Image (cartoon, rainbow, N blue to C red):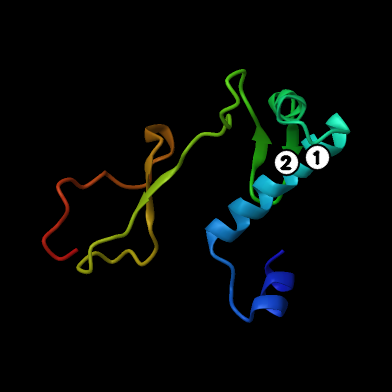
Amino acid sequence: FAAEYEAIWGETPSYLAAAQFAALCSLSQAIESAASLHPWDVAARLRNTSLYEFYADISFGPTGQVAMQTVIVQSPAASDNVTKPQVVYPYQEATARFIFPKPTWA
């Protein structure tokens, strides 16, 4: 994905580009599976979608919301010896403590 994106657009894709591509893959799979463009048919197929994409395992719950856990990262303080953003949620996967309120340097 990244190489093809860079070839077309001349820049490295952001995580949003990857997320949007994965979302469109799920939608196209649902449309093909429904053999219809009618919103109710496509929505019903989306609820039963289970798709593994480079971005994530994609599936949807009964309400149609994506059933994917959110990961929240926080950039380290300039004074820390850490150079990469740290996971602060979910707590069981956290690599750093969530800092709130926002530090004065941010």
Under tag 2, what secondary structure?
A: helix
Is there a contact, CB below 8 Å, between mark 2 and mark 1?
yes
Which residue is identified by label 1? 29
Number of numbered discs present? 2
* Local crowd size for mark 2, using a 10 Å CA cut-off: few (<14), some (14–19), many (≥20): many
Residue occupying the far front of the picture: 38
Q: Position of residue 82 (x, y in %)?
A: 32, 63
Q: Amino acid at mark 2?
A: Ser
Q: Is residue 3 above or below residue 31?
A: below
97, 46: nearer the viewer: 46
The image quarter in which residue 36 lies: top right
Residue found 84% across the figure and 30% down from its top: 34
Left or right of 80? Residue 8 is right
Left or right of 87? Residue 76 is left
Instruction: Specify the label residue 26 is tagged with.
Output: 2
Left or right of 48? Residue 106 is left
The image quarter in which residue 48 lies: top right
Q: Amino acid at mark 1?
A: Gln
93, 11: nearer the viewer: 11
Under tag 1, what secondary structure?
A: helix
Q: Position of residue 57 (x, y in %)?
A: 67, 38
Instruction: Specify the label residue 40 is tagged with.
Output: none
Residue found 72% across the figure and 79% down from its top: 7
Q: CA distance from mark 2 to mark 1?
A: 5 Å
Residue found 70% across the figure and 48% down from its top: 24
* Local crowd size for mark 1, using a 10 Å CA cut-off: few (<14), some (14–19), many (≥20): some
Q: Quadrant of the N terminus?
A: bottom right
Q: Quadrant of the C terminus?
A: bottom left
Residue occupying the far bottom of the picture: 10
Q: Is residue 86 above or below residue 30?
A: below
